[in-house]
Image (spheres, helix red, strand yellow):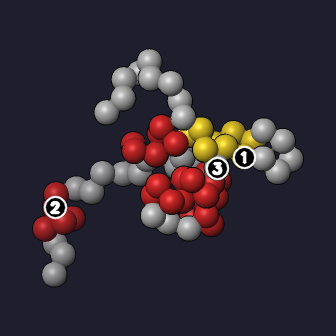
């Protein structure tokens, strides 16, 4: 895991989708609802904080995993 002084790595929504194994639409939805950090650098250019993807989301509780059939 990276420390607090680690440099931030920025990438495209496509980079983020590939890293997470989801669609670009899902990445855009996560940006919109604040799940992941992104910056708009112009009217069409957006960059996603790839460094923060590892900590995005909510950890699955052990109880939830035990309830699966």
Numbered label attached to residue 9: none
Q: Quadrant of the C terminus?
A: bottom left
* Quadrant of res 61: bottom left
Numbered label attached to residue 63: 2
Question: Nearest the camera: 15 or 52?
Answer: 15
**Relative to 57, residue 29 above or below:** below
The answer to whether the residue labelled 3 contacts the one labelled 1, judged by CB atoms less than 8 Å apart, is: yes
Q: Secondary structure at mark 3?
A: loop
**Circle 3 Cα neighbour tier, 10 Å, few/some/many (<14 / 14–19 / ≥20):** some
- Give the spatial CA distance, label 2 vs label 1: 37 Å
Numbered label attached to residue 12: 3
Q: Is residue 55 visible?
A: yes
Q: Is residue 38 left or right of residue 5?
A: right
Which of the marked residues, 2 or 1, is nearer the chain's N terminus?
Answer: 1
**Relative to 54, residue 27 above or below:** below
**Closer to the camera: disc 2 or disc 3?**
3
Residue to which mark 1 is pinned: 46
Q: Is residue 30 visible?
A: no
Name of the residue lying farthest toward the left: 66
């Amino acid at each position: 895991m990276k420390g607090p002084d680690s440099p931030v790595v920025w990438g495209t929504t496509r980079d983020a989708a590939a890293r997470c194994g989801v669609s670009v639409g899902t990445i855009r939805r996560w940006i919109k609802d604040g799940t992941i950090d992104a910056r708009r650098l112009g009217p069409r250019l957006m960059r996603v904080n790839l460094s923060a993807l590892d900590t995005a989301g909510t950890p699955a509780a052990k109880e939830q995993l035990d309830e699966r059939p």
